[in-house]
Amino acid sequence: MSFTRRPGLGRPRQTIRREDRHTVRKARVQSTASSVTIQAQVAPSLRAHVSSRTIRRRLAEGHLGSRRPLRVLPLTSTHGRLRLEWCRALGHWTAVEWNHLKRRIQIQSQQ
């Protein structure tokens, strides 16, 4: 699929190639940033206001697909195994035992 524009067809682009490259470069540097975040960062350097949808199109042209920022970093296999062991060890606890642990943590954090 080619993204070259034939002259005279469709609506003129609001950004030039240089601005498109700048947008893609920003997205590559910040791999977890959403298209709205990238839009806010590149907006001062653009000649015209562009929507986050336009930013997503330019990123797609630069072979950067969906922009779904990570909420948390994925667990490594070791962390996942340790978390599962912890859950299994404490899975049978009652509400009273959890409240006791919560109070201990609060006391330690106040000290």
Image: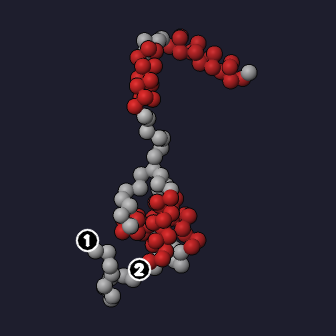
Residue underneath mark 1: 1
Which part of the image, by quadrant, shows the C terminus? top right
Q: Residue at x 50, y 70 (%)?
A: 22
Determine the CA span between mark 2 and mark 1.
Answer: 18 Å
- Name which residue type carries label 1: Met
The quadrant holding residue 74 is: top left
Mark 2 or mark 1, whichever is nearer to me: 1
Identify residue type, mark 2: Arg
* Residue occupying image coordinates x 28% and y 74%: 2
Q: Is residue 49 left or right of residue 62?
A: right
**Where does the image place residue 13, in percent across and percent down from the top left?**
41, 79
Rendering coords of residue 36 (x, y %)? 49, 60
Q: Which mark is residue 68?
A: none
Q: Is residue 107 above or below residue 7?
A: above
Residue 74 visible to an observer of this rendering: yes
Q: Within 10 Å of the Cα at label 2, are there few (<14), some (14-19), or many (20+) other Cα atoms?
A: few
Q: Which residue appears at 45% of the width and 66% of the height?
A: 24
First in residue order: circle 2 vs circle 1: 1
Q: How many marks?
A: 2
**Secondary structure category for the residue under label 1:** loop
Please state which of residues 94 and 77 is positioned toward the viewer in this rendering. 77
The residue at which mark 2 appears reads as 13
Dot 2 lies on which element?
A: loop
Q: Residues at badges 2 and 1 in contact (C-beta under 8 Å)?
A: no
- In the rendered image, is residue 50 in sight? no
Q: Is residue 80 left or right of residue 99?
A: left
Name the residue nearer the viewer: 93 or 33.
33
Query: Which image quarter: residue 11?
Result: bottom left
